Amino acid sequence: MEKFRTITLLLCLCLPLGARAQGSALLRFSEPEMRVDTVRFDSGAMTLRYPYENVSGKTVTILEVHSTCGCFTGEVDVRSLRPGAKGVLTAVFDPKSLYGDQTRYLTVVTSDGTDNVLNSIAVKGYVLRDESEGRIRYAEDLGQGLRTDVSVNALAWDSFGDFAFSIPLYNDTDTDMTLQVTAPRRVKLYAPAVIPARSRVDIRGSYDARWKRLGTEVTETLTITVNGVETAPLRIKGTL
């Protein structure tokens, strides 16, 4: 129950003051959700058009078209609409940085002079690439189907004043992996024992900098085995 209250509060804080959801919308989009089916990542950006109409009894102003990513953006041709007036939101969907099933949204913020009202429009589709998701997102191949983003990872101060690191590991196979990570004695390590198929986990750790002079450069090596077979090592590096 406490978790539900927290989520509800966060949602309320994210809405503009006086905002109402699409159930009482000032604009009506004739097709608020469009499908693009299967597209290739290198097929180029595509343009989608979402017609809308002012269904209120007042003049409506479109204040903002808000996007959460550069892959789906939009602009309207008319910012102020009298009752019954129509317009078109022109959206651009660019799949170049995407992979797999996608649902992307735009939020249209409107006002009738009294309240701000939100509309949501969406595009859905599947983005096809020649490489697996793991190869795209985690370019460093450690062997045995294990991947990460970089082979040398930086030590940095965390909120507790420790020198810490976090390293993503991705299982790019169709079976679960048994993982074992061995670290030098100065490194305190937290690592899962299993990585599920086609999944990411993070190994985290901190470096014991006691008895080390400030400004000292540190390099440590983590040894990794997958299903009992050793892979390429990972290194953590930083300046104390």
Image: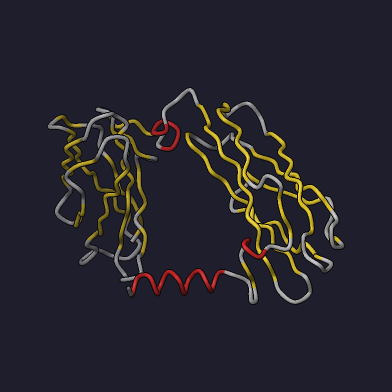
In the rendered image, the vertical position of residue 233 relative to residue 77, given as above or below: above
Is 75 on the left or on the right of 2, as rendered? right
**Residue shown at 35%/70% (left/top)?**
3
Front one among 85 and 98: 85
In what quadrant of the picture does the C terminus appear? bottom left
Q: Quadrant of residue 212?
A: bottom left
In the rendered image, the vertical position of residue 49 relative to residue 209, given as above or below: above
Q: How many marks?
A: 0
In the rendered image, the vertical position of residue 11 relative to residue 176, given as above or below: below
In what quadrant of the picture does the N terminus appear? bottom left
**Residue shown at 71%/74% (left/top)?**
115
Is 157 on the left or on the right of 188, as rendered? right
Front one among 165 and 145: 145
**Residue shown at 63%/61% (left/top)?**
22
Is 24 on the left or on the right of 171, as rendered? right
**Residue shown at 37%/59% (left/top)?**
156
In the rendered image, the vertical position of residue 103 relative to residue 78, given as above or below: above
Residue 198 point in image, percent of width and height: 32, 35
Q: Quadrant of residue 46?
A: top right
Residue 38 point in image, percent of width and height: 55, 28
Residue 157 point in image, percent of width and height: 36, 64
Seen as rendered, the residue at the extreme top is 130
Residue 67 point in image, percent of width and height: 63, 53
Give the colour scheme of this rendering: secondary structure
